[in-house]
Image: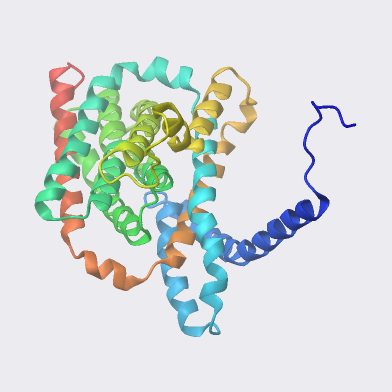
Amino acid sequence: MEPSHALPVKPLPRVLAGGRRARKASKAVLPGLAVAVTVALPAAWLGRLVPAIGGPVFGIVVGALAGALLRRIAPPGTAERLRPGFAVVGRQVLQVSIIVLGAGLPLGAVLSVGMGSLPVMLGTLAVALLGAWAVGGLLGVHRETRLLIGVGTGVCGASAIAAVTAAVGAAEARVAYALGTIFTFNIAAVVLFPPVGHLLGMSQEAFGLWSGTAINDTSSVVATSYSYGTGAGQYAVVVKLTRSLMIVPICAVLVLWRSFGRGARNVRRDESAVKRIWRAFPVFVVGFLTASAVATYDGIPASWQPVLPMISTFLITVALSGIGLSLRFSQLREAGPRPLLLGAILWTAVSAAGIGLQAITGRL
């Protein structure tokens, strides 16, 4: 007689069937994944040539153009075969990119230097998020687009948009519109911030704090602050990294709101609150925190640190290339100019709030 404590063994036919399903799923994903990586390679190259724009923005633009071309010239049924791969790239690869981003953000090193910037950082973040909700509502902008533009403006541009997209599953067209809006005002910041800084007589540290809290993508922060001076650039990068950590609580709150709030989806009312929180909490946020903790305690070799942000950026570029490949331009036309107007209002408000808060806290 078999002992009562013996582990259950799945019948061999069921195991083989599971293996066949896994192989079938892999075959379904590979074509779309290969196309997304192919598109991401030139996008990443363009991003290195024009760092003020960056690979992720080029990824979604080149992806959208390539997708439109494919739909015109590819044989019938090609789009259906590629769609599973695009879906995996736009979600799972996006989540992996955020985990790798955490490995390049050692919590201790960032927080020890960035604590002094917290009042300005949190103030500008509040302006961005509350402004996105209030002004976006008045303009009639869809709530997902408001959210993406708000976190992109208040936290860290494409990386924040990518993280929130992975957390809430935002539609491709809204992701594209948010990225386009963020990109527009990144370019404006690169051109306008240094003259304004000189006009106000900002020190290197003051300008680094302003650009690190009021400019969106890291590449644009680096381009703008280093054009003002090396001291400004070094300080701005640390402030920007500290600001990037706000991805974690924002994603956690969004996922819980999505699970528990009004209109919550996939909620089982018979589950306990703890079980629902556990089921809802995004694994990639746990991965981000774990990777960052490992980096904090020197668990990642120092020689890897310069490479990790490049890997994370490339993975985000691959993911956004997949989103771009799934995008249809008709979806963008339906949104109209209102999201761009929202982005302009938020960018102006955050830039002005940054200067005001620095003046109040004696950091101007």
Foreground of the two, 62 or 259? 259
Which quarter of the figure is the N terminus placed in?
top right
Image quadrant in which you'd find residue 113: top left
Q: Position of residue 80 (x, y in %)?
A: 53, 73
Left or right of residue 344, residue 316 in this image:
right
Query: Above or below — where is 94 with respect to 276?
Result: below
How far across and down, in percent of the image, does residue 109 sit?
47, 18
Q: Is residue 342 left or right of residue 172?
A: left
Camera-side residue of 106 and 261: 261
In the displayed structure, 348 sits above or below 275; it is: below
Determine which quarter of the picture holds residue 60: bottom left
The residue nearer to you, when weighing 185 against 118, is 118
- Residue 29 image point, x, y percent: 61, 62
Q: Residue at x 40, y 41 (%)?
A: 268
- Confirm whether residue 152 shows in the render: yes
Q: Is residue 70 above or below residue 345?
A: below
Residue 246 at what x, y percent from top left? Answer: 36, 30
**At 81% across and 30% down in the image, what residue appears?**
6
Q: Residue at x 49, y 77 (%)?
A: 70
User: Quadrant location of the C terminus?
Assistant: top left
